[in-house]
Image (cartoon, rainbow, N blue to C red):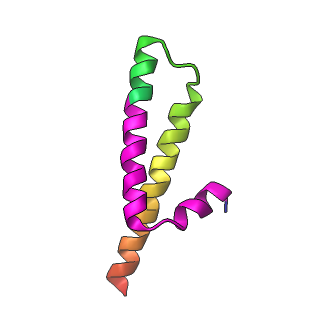
Amino acid sequence: MSKQLTELRNLNDAELKTKLGDLKEELFNLRFQNATGQLENPMRIREVKRTYARIQTILTERQMAAKQA
């Protein structure tokens, strides 16, 4: 497992949801910058989207585990 994924898994649900909100806002800003031609690092969009998806996956896994318990 990557270091980033391990760090994300160590966070609680509230912290993950806060991070999701931050990433969503950052993604919006990155897309806006890309549309206006001001984005310096287009790969950052991919990184943010993947991190967002990882957090969503972790939250879904926890919800499924709670339902089965």
Farthest-out residue, top: 37
Note whether 53 is above or below 40 in the view shown.
below
Is 60 in the magenta? no
Residue 42 coordinates in the image, percent (x, y): 55, 25
Examine the rendered structure and indicate whether residue 1 appears above or below residue 65. Answer: above
Q: Tally the numbered discs.
A: 0
Which residue: 40% across, 44% down? 22
- Counting from the top left corner in percent of width and height, residue 36 is at 41, 12
> Which quarter shows the N terminus?
bottom right
Expressed as whole percent of the image width and height from the top left, the position of residue 50 reads 51, 45
Overall secondary structure of the magenta section: helix
- Highlighted range, magenta: 2-28
| Quarter of the rendering occupied by the C terminus | bottom left
> What residue is at 42 percent from the left and 60 percent from the top?
15
**x, y (%) of residue 30?**
45, 27
Residue furthest out toward the left = 67
Report the residue at 50% width, 32% height from top: 45
